[in-house]
Image: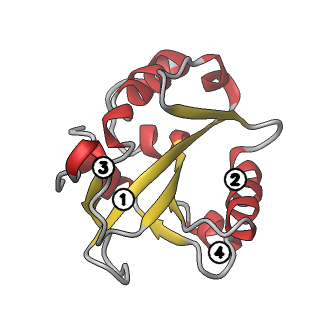
Amino acid sequence: MTGAGPGGEPESSAPPVVVIVDVANVMGSRPDGWWRDRAGAATRLLERMPALVGRAVEAPDGADRPTVAISRLVAVVEGAAKAASAPDGIDLLPAPADGDTAIVEEAARLAEAGERVLVVTADRGLRARLGDGVQVAGPGWFNELIGR
């Protein structure tokens, strides 16, 4: 992870990006017993995220720039994980139905508003549903950023 500029602002060379996290997919990428307590596992994962907001970090493979500045983190939860609580600085989006549809809709809404969007998921079906211009990264990239 690279640092922030003066005053904690992201480095100016790093373009700002809103990161949407497929929490179920990221949780499932590590066999740490998450299935025994999905809400607790989601809460623990969410607690690792706030330090990323406002930071310039190494971009995932295939990105058009070497770094991105995370301007906002949106964590999408579904099922039992909707009982999770998020710390300040993390936008928690409980999926009304399935998480994939909530992620696709949020990514489209943000992209339409002019935001650069990066979705964290390994789900190939979800990736195929994302609009043009939405970047994707796998859970490995995100897990490394949060020290998981």
Residue 55's disc number: 3
Q: Tell me: residue 26, above or below residue 80.
A: below
Q: Is mark 3 on a helix, strand or loop?
A: loop
In the rendered image, is residue 143 in sight?
A: yes
Q: How far apart are marks 4 and 3 (CA)?
A: 28 Å
- Asked whether disc 4 touches disc 3, contact meaning CB atoms under 8 Å apart, the reply is no
Q: Which amino acid does label 1 sit on?
A: Ala
Task: Count residues near mark 3 (Cα–Cα under 10 Å), then give few for <14, some for 14-19, many for 20+.
Answer: many
Q: Name the residue under label 1.
A: 69
Q: Which of marks 1 and 3 is nearer the N terminus?
A: 3
The residue that label 2 is drawn on is 100
Q: Mark 2 or mark 1, which is nearer the start of the sequence?
A: 1
Distance from Cα at disc 1 to Cα at disc 2: 24 Å
In space, the residues marked 1 and 3 are separated at their CA atoms by 5 Å
Residue at x 69% of width, y 29% of height: 79
**Left or right for 63, reference 66:** right
Between discs 2 and 4, the one toward the N terminus = 2
- The answer to the question of whether label 4 and label 1 lie on touching residues, with beta carbons closer than 8 A, is no
Spatial distance from mark 4 to mark 1, Cα to Cα?
25 Å
| Label drawn at residue 111 | none
Query: Mark on residue 128?
Result: 4
Instruction: Write down the quadrant of residue 112 in the picture.
Output: bottom right
Identify residue type, mark 3: Arg
Nearer-the-camera pick, 5 or 95: 5
**Mark 1 and mark 3 residues within 8 Å of each other at the beta carbon:** yes
Q: Which of marks 4 and 3 is in front?
A: 3
- Asked if residue 83 is positioned above or below residue 116 in the image, the reply reads above
Q: Where is residue 73 in the image (x, y as percent from the top left)?
A: 50, 44
- Colour pattern: secondary structure
SS category of the residue bearing label 4: helix
